[in-house]
Image (cartoon, rainbow, N blue to C red):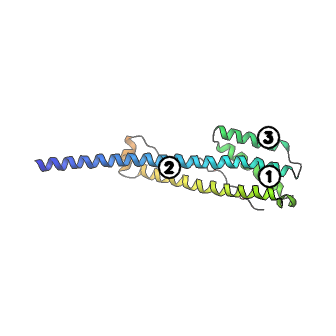
Amino acid sequence: MDTLLLILIAFVLLIIIYLIYAINKFVYLKKRIERSKATIDVFLKERFDLIPNLVECVKGYMNYESNTLEHITNLRNSFREQVSEDAGNQLNQYYKGLLATVEKYPELKASESFMNLQKNLEKIESEIAAARRIYINDITNFNTKVSSFPSNLIAKIFHYKEFSYPLFETEEIKIQF
């Protein structure tokens, strides 16, 4: 009888240890997703801050629509208030129009300040792409944990739900001059 009691206690302890491990793993994975999302926010804000500088540089070489810079600034401010995929997509559209306009001005493409801005923007774009891949990977890891046995039982008990992917799936900008 004592051996049976010891086996039962050992079994209960193993279950408790696994439960603690699984809950901590969910917390860890959720924090990774939050950190990945915050990283994307930082890079998107950097891009939003850099694009008006690019517009100002371009305005020096051509008669660019004055309301474009104002609209981009408004989009950037609305993005700062709350991360918005819509604001990001709108900014991408304005930026693509700006890039198309730049093609008409070879002296602008040779400008050192424009080249520096372009290189910084290319770097930020690649960092955003890398951060998005990390974010999606973190979500995949969490969702796998939520849906695989036996951790799915713990996920149901503690109301952990799968994350969805649509956030930050904006169209990437290809910069080529």
Q: Position of residue 128 (x, y in %)?
A: 63, 53
Give the residue type that dot 2 points to. Answer: Arg
Secondary element under disc 1, as helix, strand or loop, is helix
The residue tagged 1 is 98
Mark 3 vs 1: CB contact within 8 A: no
Q: Position of residue 114 (x, y in %)?
A: 80, 56
The residue tagged 2 is 32
- Is 138 on the left-hand or right-hand side of 103? left
The residue located at (39%, 40%) in the rendering is 158
Q: Position of residue 94 (x, y in %)?
A: 76, 48
C-alpha gap between disc 3 and disc 1? 14 Å
C-alpha gap between disc 3 and disc 2? 36 Å
The residue located at (22%, 49%) in the rendering is 10
Q: Residues within 10 Å of mark 2 (few under 14, many from 20)?
A: some
Residue 70 badge: 3
Question: Relative to residue 86, is residue 133 depicted above or below?
Answer: below
- Is 113 on the left-hand or right-hand side of 149? right
Q: Residues within 10 Å of mark 3 (few under 14, many from 20)?
A: few
Name the image quarter holding residue 175.
bottom right
Front-most of residues 76 and 143: 76
Q: Position of residue 68 (x, y in %)?
A: 81, 44
Earlier residue among tags 1 and 2:
2
Secondary element under disc 3, as helix, strand or loop, is helix
Give the residue type that dot 1 points to. Answer: Leu
Earlier residue among tags 3 and 2:
2
The residue located at (19%, 47%) in the rendering is 8
Q: Residues within 10 Å of mark 1 (few under 14, many from 20)?
A: some
Give the residue type that dot 3 points to. Answer: Glu
